[in-house]
Image (cartoon, rainbow, N blue to C red):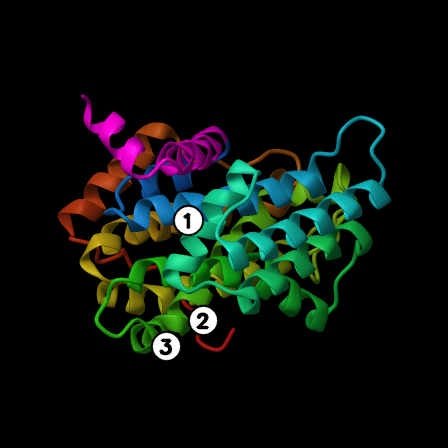
Amino acid sequence: MSRRTRVDLVRPHARYDEVADASAALVISSYSSSFGLASRLLAEPARSHVRNIYALVRVADEIVDAPRPGQGVDERQLALDELETETNAAMDRGSSTNLVVHAFARSARHVGIDTSLTAPFFASMRTDLTRTVHDEASLTEYIYGSAEVVGLMCLRAFVADEAAPDQRYDELYTGAKHLGAAFQKVNFLRDFGTDSGDLGRRYLIGLDPADPTDAAWTRWLDEIDTDLAIAADTIPRLPRGSRVAVCVAHDLFAELNSRLRATPASMAARQRVRVPTATKTRIAATALLRRGHPRTTTTVVVGA
């Protein structure tokens, strides 16, 4: 009798759990080469938990940004509401008939994710259905819900098996928030043309899609470098099993920010800046050699 068969006889639901985790892993490998590369360097069980978190986030994002033909805002709003309702119910009961939700809920219950993190996330996703232009207050709230809480969910996964997980979470909280914010702001910049043109959204305060100035572009780049520098101070204090992976993610986005800095705003509005696969591989190898100590950013404006 195989090991899998023996496990299934003892725990009949085990195969369903495995299929749910595999479904989440497929989502991350299909949608994100950079995040997928970094996640492969995580030790288990954090690797599976982070994949499960990402999968739910990705599904919500697809509801908002990739509607079915003829699907209007009201239908997407309903689909998002149903996804949140099912996620909340699954976190309470520990299971779902939706494989991605099932995988997320099992991880959430294990690592300590609750609605204090999921509710702001879904709120930000709804914002994308109704708001096209942001002010300072709405953008701060949006970045917290769409990106910072995702970093905090991952942090819960990283410290879940530590001796004092809540204390470790509090110690690393600020760095995780800033790293999530940096990721989101980099994506705002590299998707500048698509967001403003195809989706009709303006996240980047001070940047006019019709006439983007390099001065405003540079202010955003400096703010990202500040977020990355704050996160870099935290990464060496992460648990050993997650340190290198987070370092790789940090350094990949630092590389993206450097490439965005070398790209005039008017050009970035027309083409998406990318990091070549060979460069990604080199960044990952270097992070391994540095044992999870991230590279320093080239420009840091304290208080930006």
The Cα atoms of the two marked residues, 2 and 3, are separated by: 25 Å
Q: Nearer the viewer, mark 1 or mark 3?
A: 3
- Side of 240 relative to 102 (left or right): left
> Could you tell me what secondary structure mostly forms the magenta stretch?
helix
- Side of 78 relative to 218 (left or right): right
Q: Secondary structure at mark 1?
A: helix
Q: Secondary structure at mark 3?
A: helix
Residue at numbered disc 3:
170
Q: Secondary structure at mark 2?
A: loop
Residue at numbered disc 2:
301
Q: Is residue 217 magenta?
A: no
Residue drawn at point x = 18 percent, y = 21 percent = 1
- Side of 23 relative to 128 (left or right): left
Considering only order in the chain, which callout, 3 or 2, is on the residue closer to the N terminus?
3
Q: Amino acid at mark 3?
A: Asp
Q: In the rendered view, would you say 231 is above or below 249? A: below
The Cα atoms of the two marked residues, 1 and 3, are separated by: 24 Å
Which segment did they paint magenta? 1-30
Considering only order in the chain, which callout, 3 or 1, is on the residue closer to the N terminus?
3
Q: Amino acid at mark 1?
A: Phe
- Closer-to-camera residue (206/134): 134
Residue drawn at point x = 48 percent, y = 28 percent = 30
